[in-house]
Amino acid sequence: MYTNDVNVTYANALEEYRKVGDVISVYKKLFDEIDGNYLNGIEHVISIGPGPGTADILFLNKTAPNLMKFTAVEKDASCMEALKENIAKEFSTSVTVDLHLSVSQHWQGPREKADLVLMFHSLYYFNEEERKEIYKKCFNHWLKPNGKLFVLLHKDLYEATDTFCLNDILRETGRTPHIEAYTIKKELASLGYVVEKVYNYEYRQDLQALHDNVVSFIMIHANPPFEDEDVVRRAIKKLIEDGNKGYTSGNLFSVVQQL
């Protein structure tokens, strides 16, 4: 997938967006909060929509020292190439890697069941029916008994000190805001799944530092898509004038199947 600038891939735009606010440092502190015993014995992990894999790999390097197999499903070709590079740099050669360039909705599932499934900032790309189907596949077909799902997702209107700045931009331009953690947790609970542990994070992004690549990233995330980047720039300018401080917060939460 490419942005409005044909030279800017989605993977590059995402990494530039994360630099505004030093997001990876925030994730490092977040993942340090997880008790090592909680994920004891994790050997096979499935990642759904990892993008370049930066957050997923960081999480696993901190929580899964005995990792033996990593399966990932990613729909974007530029992200898949970045994911391969990051795996080569960060994972031991003893880890078996199984990568699938596909939309997750069409993926046939793993060859072997896993101990853990990661969905880090990927549920934005599923409608409600698709989300319910992927939860079912996750717990009925992909995970071993007692396996866990970990979800990383932004907060917005609920359980947050302020609204999510990216959603503020989308609302300002008449686009559909991204689904938030509160909604997903309620959805999972209504289907009988148990949200077992919740970890919180927050940071601010300097809206004045949202340069071209970051604007490109925002444009990709819009529904309906933007055809003119000036619309995004005007929205950001107005939010700054209105005192928006670029607030972002979210949850990392684990989900298990009720026995």
Image (cartoon, rainbow, N blue to C red):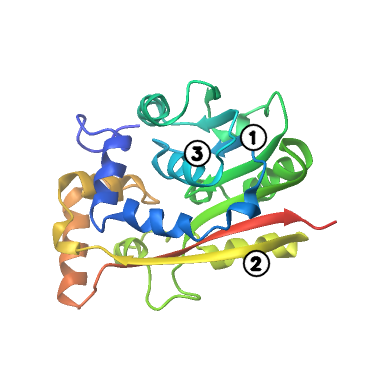
Residue toward you, 238 or 186: 186
Asked which secondary structure carries label 3, the reply is loop
Q: Quadrant of residue 165?
A: bottom left
- The x, y position of residue 13, in whole percent, is 27, 41
Query: How many numbered markers are drawn?
Result: 3
| Amino acid on which disc 2 is placed | Lys
Asked if residue 50 is positioned above or below residue 241 in the image, the reply reads above
CB contact under 8 Å: marks 3 and 2: no
Label 1: few (<14), some (14–19) or many (≥20) C-alpha neighbours in 10 Å: some
- Can you give x and y, in whole percent of width and height, for residue 94 in the image? 53, 21
Q: Quadrant of residue 240?
A: bottom left
Cα distance between the residues tagged 2 and 1: 29 Å
- Residue, disc 3: 49
Reading the chain from its start, which is encountered first: label 1 or label 3?
A: 1
Q: Which residue shows up at 53% across the image and 49% down it?
A: 123
Residue 251 place in picture, x, y as percent: 50, 63
Residue at the spot of label 2: 186
- Measure the alpha-carbon separation of dots 1 and 3: 19 Å
N-terminal label among 3 and 2: 3
Q: Quadrant of residue 206?
A: bottom left
- Amino acid beneath label 3: Gly
Mark 2 or 1, nearer chain start:
1
Does residue 216 appear in this view? yes
Binning the other alpha carbons within 10 Å of mark 2 as few (below 14), some (14 to 19) or many (20 upward) gives few
Residue beneath disc 1: 43
User: Which residue sits at x=30%, y=67%?
Assistant: 172
